[in-house]
Image (spheres, rainbow, N blue to C red):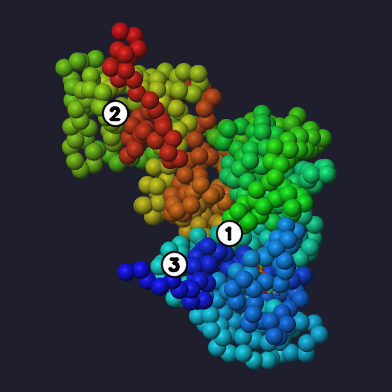
């Protein structure tokens, strides 16, 4: 039987809309701050509790909402920003869909207090489940304050989907900084559970960027400037020497709004071509102003993507503008790849071997012994005794090393092109990427330290001071316990500066400062989302410390590296999921040359 078609009740329609607009606490932060910006505010304060799960509150000193409109503002498709359809093409404000407040009110408790300049009193309303519960006049400053409590109280599935406090906090900091960067003419403050995270005074773009990402950036920002009839380009790129291994410092703002764009990103990458080595990503804070009629900002409900009418021209203009900036500031000649900290880390394995579990093993066993009757390699792991058949002409054979105490001196190996280690096992010819192999060894080593919980570090003769930006402080304090459990010891001078007293023994003392900077500064890394902090830190340390490709290794170093790799729990893929080695079995070779 066909049911009668009915209109969805208003609160259900709102909840559906909320599903598109409000994904997590950071979406509320974005919508409320955008409304405050649109209201012409010069001061905006953000307050959150429990990473926004219990409270997100935004207070502004903007235009305020008229007494008779405040309830209307929470109704669906209510907006003061569009009157006729044609206006859609002229939008300069952040919001215009009139969906945010109604969506928010459908999945949380909301309290709004607002007063216009010419009113003596503010009007305050409380909304629960889209119903106005309380409506009164009260004394309050000019402007608007909106508190959003108990997010998703009525949608448990959505509430359960929220991530840990630290992940949700990162999303909030992201939204906040995107809005704060480009609205540098506005004072912003941000309090989390009564602690001040940011207090950003009105300034210019350059200072705003460095007050968020650290003063170190001040010297690294190169201005970008171009004006054509199609687009006006401004902002800054980070000199190649300041490029990072993460993509945490890549921002495009189109008409004052943060957007993601792979094609614009491609244009930037191509203008940096030849200036950055593989692992590094250009940093940029680029603003594009363009006639709103020539873009479509509405292709994505959360409005992070735009479609340009004339993509090709914008690509070309952006690329040549950046090349020009890079040229004018003569950043290319001062490029010094040798300054890459990871290049200078001495190969620690020379003196120290990570402590792998000691296991008893038949010392006369030699995996490389040329003995064709030996079709079984015995591998003795901690508790179990495995016998792994390596049938040399089975295509499906699995290449398998385990926690074997190979005597490194028995390993036959040579280095090819200063980056591959070539060896032979019974399974065939194995070619190993030295950088990825070492990343794997270090990664498992640090994970091991973490699971032991306690490892003593080595005291530094001269403690190293590191100045942290706001962003770095947040990351640092979040991970401090993990750093300590792998052997770091800190003395906090002020919350902004830390003194490193001890470092994990494995870290070399040489160039340690670069390594620590790499670890503690600007290390927002989004590819890492979803991993535990201990895992992320182990990966980051492994990546920074691993011997680079291109480094000549002597025979003992090659043997030690292979022995350590064979002792790893996993030896096929790097911590970043890239293949470490390839194996040519006899059938592979037969196909090629017999
Ligand atoms: P939109 O921003 O898309 O217009 P919202 O649901 O976010 O829709 O807001 C609805 C309306 O409420 C806005 O158009 C604006 O008139 C009013 N409003 C919301 N927040 C504020 C604020 N902080 N100050 C002044 N007016 C506001
Ligand atoms: Mg809005």
Quadrant of the frame with the N terminus? bottom left
Tell me the SS state at disc 1: loop
Q: Which is more toward the observer, 283 or 500?
A: 283
- Ligand 1 closer than 8 Å to the CB at disc 1? no
Q: Residue furthest left?
A: 373
Q: Residues within 10 Å of mark 2 (few under 14, many from 20)?
A: some
Q: Residue at x 82, y 35 (%)?
A: 328
Q: Residue at x 67, y 65 (%)?
A: 95
Q: Which of the numbered marks, if any, corresponds to residue 158?
A: 3
Tell me the distance, in whole angstroms, between the alpha carbons under discs 3 and 2. Answer: 44 Å
Residue 212 image position (x, y, % from top left): 68, 57
Q: Quadrant of ligand 2?
A: bottom right
- Dot 3 or dot 2: first in sequence order is 3
Q: Is residue 75 above or below residue 575?
A: below
Q: Quadrant of residue 590?
A: top left
Q: Which of the numbered marks, if any, corresponds to residue 301?
A: 1
Residue 564 image position (x, y, % from top left): 37, 33
Tell me the distance, in whole angstroms, between the alpha carbons under discs 2 and 1. Answer: 48 Å
Q: Which of the numbered marks, if any, corresponds to residue 47?
A: none
Q: Is residue 498 visible?
A: no
Front disc: 2 or 1: 1
């Amino acid at each position: 039987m066909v049911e009668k078609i009915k209109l969805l009740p208003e609160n259900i329609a709102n909840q559906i809309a909320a599903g598109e607009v409000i994904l997590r606490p950071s979406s509320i932060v974005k919508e409320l701050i955008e409304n405050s910006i649109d209201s012409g505010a010069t001061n905006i304060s953000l307050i959150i509790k429990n990473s926004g799960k219990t409270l997100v509150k935004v207070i502004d000193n903007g235009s305020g909402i008229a007494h008779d409109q405040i309830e209307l503002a929470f109704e669906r498709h209510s907006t003061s920003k569009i009157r006729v359809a044609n206006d859609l093409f002229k939008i300069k404000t952040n919001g215009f869909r009139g969906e945010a407040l109604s969506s928010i009110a459908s999945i949380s408790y909301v309290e709004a207090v607002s007063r216009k300049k010419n009113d003596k009193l503010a009007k305050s309303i409380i909304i629960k489940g889209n119903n106005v519960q309380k409506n009164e006049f009260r004394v309050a400053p000019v402007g608007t304050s909106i508190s959003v409590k108990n997010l998703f109280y009525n949608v448990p599935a959505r509430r359960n989907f929220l991530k840990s406090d630290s992940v949700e906090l990162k999303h909030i900091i992201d939204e906040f900084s995107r809005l704060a960067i480009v609205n540098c003419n506005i004072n912003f403050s941000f309090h989390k559970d009564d602690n001040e995270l940011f207090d950003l005074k009105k300034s210019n773009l350059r200072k705003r960027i460095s007050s968020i990402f650290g003063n170190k950036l001040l010297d690294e920002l190169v201005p970008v400037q171009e004006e054509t009839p199609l687009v006006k380009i401004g902002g800054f790129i980070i000199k190649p020497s300041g490029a990072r291994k993460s993509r945490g410092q890549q921002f495009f703002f189109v008409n004052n709004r943060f957007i993601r764009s792979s094609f614009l990103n491609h244009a930037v990458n191509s203008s940096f071509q030849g200036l950055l080595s593989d692992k590094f990503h250009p940093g940029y804070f680029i603003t594009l102003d363009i006639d709103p009629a020539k873009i479509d900002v509405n292709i994505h409900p959360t409005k992070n993507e735009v479609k340009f009418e004339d993509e090709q021209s914008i690509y070309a203009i952006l690329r040549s503008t950046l090349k020009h900036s890079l040229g004018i500031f003569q950043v290319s000649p001062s490029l010094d790849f040798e300054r890459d900290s990871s290049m200078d880390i001495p190969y620690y394995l020379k003196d120290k071997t990570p402590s792998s579990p000691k296991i008893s093993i038949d010392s006369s066993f030699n995996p490389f012994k040329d003995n064709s009757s030996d079709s079984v390699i015995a591998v003795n792991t901690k508790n179990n005794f495995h016998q792994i058949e390596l049938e040399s002409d089975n295509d499906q054979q699995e290449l398998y090393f385990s926690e074997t105490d190979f005597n490194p001196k028995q390993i036959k190996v040579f280095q090819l092109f200063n980056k591959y280690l070539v060896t032979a096992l019974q399974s065939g010819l194995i070619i190993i990427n030295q950088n990825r192999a070492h990343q794997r060894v270090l990664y498992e080593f640090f994970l091991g330290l973490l699971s032991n919980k306690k490892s003593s570090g080595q005291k530094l003769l001269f403690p190293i001071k590191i100045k942290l930006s706001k962003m770095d402080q947040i990351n640092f304090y979040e991970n401090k316990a993990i750093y300590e459990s792998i052997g770091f010891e800190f003395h906090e001078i002020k919350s902004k500066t830390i003194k490193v007293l001890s470092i994990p023994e494995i870290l070399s003392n040489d160039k340690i400062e670069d390594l620590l900077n790499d670890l503690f500064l600007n290390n927002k890394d989004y590819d890492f989302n979803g991993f535990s902090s201990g895992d992320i830190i182990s990966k980051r340390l492994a990546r920074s410390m691993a011997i680079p490709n291109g480094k000549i290794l002597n025979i003992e170093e090659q043997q030690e590296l292979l022995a350590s790799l064979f002792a790893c729990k996993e030896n096929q893929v790097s911590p970043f999921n890239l293949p470490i080695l390839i194996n040519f079995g006899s059938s592979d070779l037969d196909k090629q040359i017999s």
